[in-house]
Amino acid sequence: DAGITQSPRHKVTETGTPVTLRCHQTENHRYMYWYRQDPGHGLRLIHYSYGVKDTDKGEVSDGYSVSRSKTEDFLLTLESATSSQTSVYFCAISATAENTEAFFGQGTRLTVV
Amino acid sequence: DAKTTQPPSMDCAEGRAANLPCNHSTISGNEYVYWYRQIHSQGPQYIIHGLKNNETNEMASLIITEDRKSSTLILPHATLRDTAVYYCIVHSYNAGNMLTFGGGTRLMVKP
């Protein structure tokens, strides 16, 4: 299995508090992604990174920010959590931009109350 | 990226071949066909991908029609552990290799 670790795996937080999710990889892959998965919506891309300090927005980026200061770590921050951000968050990595597979982490279940 | 159409659900008997169809009639010449699956609440798992030719690996076979407008994922001998949601995705190179997931097909393998 690809070396991807998401932390925490489960978190309950209150509305309005900041939350940071961490994705750590040991594969030295260039590309990293954050997705969220909700019933009825499937997986949707939040943000992605194509290198250290290089990030861009995905389909559902409002309310989220990311940072990548090292190849191995990609952080997803909810500046002020809302109930609509209750979801399962998946991190993924890939070595190149085409003709290659992406590897997904085990997910972080976030509940905002 | 081209849009895909998959049946929402399928059943398969254990030990039989599972054939999962996918339509991608608007696929362009530089777009690959990828298949992933998601077992229960785990992260999606890569299965196979191809461009024009049929592909086979230890998990499955991918059959792409000559006009590339549809494809079929074949699990040759389905087991109960193959029960999952299967996603067919087509995409080309762009910044970030972003995968766009649709609804997928929920495959139920029954004893």
Image (tube, coloured by chain):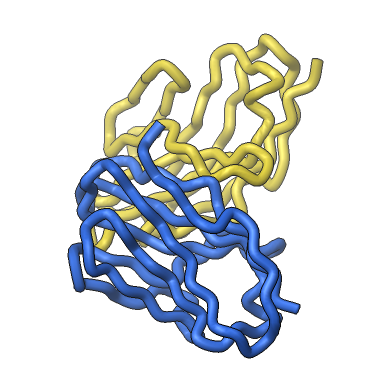
Q: Furthest-right residue in view?
A: B111
Q: How many marks?
A: 0
According to the rendering, which colour does chain A have?
Answer: blue
Q: Quadrant of the N terminus of chain B?
A: bottom left
According to the rendering, which colour does chain B have?
Answer: yellow
Q: Is residue A100 left or right of residue B21?
A: left
Residue A76, horizontal then vertical, whole percent:
43, 71
Is B12 rendered above or below residue B103?
A: above
Residue found 48% across the figure and 66% down from its top:
A21
Q: Is residue A58 left or right of residue B74?
A: left
Residue found 41% across the figure and 57% down from its top:
A23
Q: Name the foreground residue: A89 vs B75.
A: A89
Q: Quadrant of the C terminus of chain B?
A: top right
Q: Quadrant of residue A48?
A: bottom left
Residue B86, horizontal then vertical, whole percent:
58, 40
Residue A3, horizontal then vertical, whole percent:
36, 39
Is A48 rendered above or below residue B49?
A: below
Is B46 rendered above or below residue A69?
A: above
